[in-house]
Amino acid sequence: MDKAVQLTGLTRPEMLSFVETLGEPAYRGRQLFAALQNRRLRSFDDITDLPKDFRGQLNEIARAATLKIESRYVSDDGTRRYLMKTHDSLPVETVFIPEERRDTICFSSQSGCPLQCTFCLTAQLGLLRSLTAGEIVEQIQVALNDAYGVGVKPPRGTNLVAMGAGEPLLNLDQLLKALRVMADPQGMHIVPNRVTVSTAGVVPRILDLANTSDRPHLAISLAAPTDELRNELMPINKRWPLDELLSACKVFEKTLKPAERLTFEYVMLDGVNDSDEQARQLANLLNRHTIKSKVNLIPHNAADPLPYQPSSDERVDRFKNILESKGIHTYVRRPRGRDIFAACGQLAARQTTLNTRIQIGAN
Ligand code: SF4
């Protein structure tokens, strides 16, 4: 067990208190925070504007980085997947998705996941442990440093989505802390308005998030229009069935900003949840609860040994048309990074032998 203080998870005020306990003035704390969060340096030895003795002291008692990059995979479409290891050797995966308008980083909130969604590879790992705020922040730093260079400001800004491994609302405290650290204007300055958190439907935490100031956006993974099917695909539904989940969404809706909508994600599984009848059931369900929302249809990403295939493009279009004919705003999320196991539901700490794998020793 590494007892050293993990400094990437500290807010600026906490960093100031930390250096104070070492007998250093407050400006050293500000310097250290800016070096780690704004310049995204991952080793104390690189912070050459700090006195050498102080750097030596930091090396003894603290860590500027704890995640080790094991592998980096680059997809044909430019998506990058990073497989990292925590100090206790657990896998952490992060995906960088270049986009025309603004790049997106999909990060993990847990190593593995305790929920058992049957269409998701991560489920097969089980929960290894929840990640700390510092481990969440580090994932973003690693992806940005690799994509743009150490400390280089992302030219188009960055969107973050908590849609990697894990159920983010089962690690809400650490997640919100990481978001506070990243929102700091003296650090990475990625504000919660640029962040979307996706949940399988942990109802009490949805209500907690509704009461959180400076909260991120929320997306709910539905995957089925009826309790019967959702119980099968997402067993969390047995604990919080659809009506309870949508009632919580209705409470959350009251906190939406004028241009904001709640997102419902719907993974499209061939022959399982993609019929015309199921599209009508989904539209009726959402219309019954009258929530200001939109639906993202996500064609499933097939991966052995999952027993599903993606719906055909025609089926997805037809499903979309039915929802739209009933007044539901619907979008189709085209898969990215399938060839490197970086797409939704494919994160399972896979080491592939594809030629897209590149070992990198430094970050
Ligand atoms: S879909 Fe999300 S919540 Fe469900 S098992 Fe996978 S990682 Fe966990």
Image (cartoon, rainbow, N blue to C red):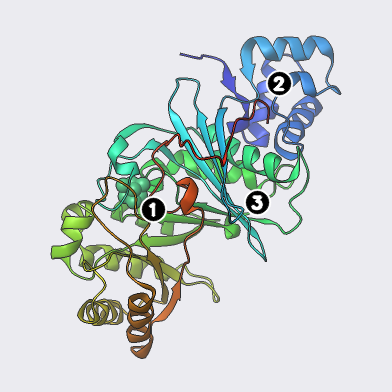
Q: Is residue 250 left or right of residue 56?
A: left
Reading the chain from its start, which is encountered first: label 3 or label 1? Answer: 3
Question: Measuring 70% from the left and 39% from the top, which residue is drawn there?
Answer: 145
Mark 2 highlights which residue?
19
Measure the alpha-carbon separation of dots 3 and 2. Answer: 25 Å
Q: Are marks 3 and 1 in contact (CB under 8 Å)?
A: no
Q: Amino acid at mark 3?
A: Ile
Q: Is residue 95 above or below residue 363?
A: below
- The front one of 38 and 23 is 38
Reading the chain from its start, which is encountered first: label 3 or label 2? Answer: 2
- Find numbered disc 2 in the image and state the secondary structure of the residue it sits on: helix
Q: Is residue 186 left or right of residue 298?
A: right
How many C-alpha atoms fall within 10 Å of the one at disc 2: few (<14), some, or many (≥20)?
A: some
Nearer to us of marks 3 and 1 is: 3
Q: Quadrant of the N terminus?
A: top left
Q: Amino acid at mark 1?
A: Asp
Picture coordinates of residue 305 (x, y %)?
27, 45
From where the camera sits, is residue 104 visible?
yes
From where the camera sits, is residue 211 visible?
no
Mark 1 highlights which residue?
208
Mark seen at residue 190:
3
Question: Measuring 64% from the left and 30% from the top, which residue is drawn there?
Answer: 360
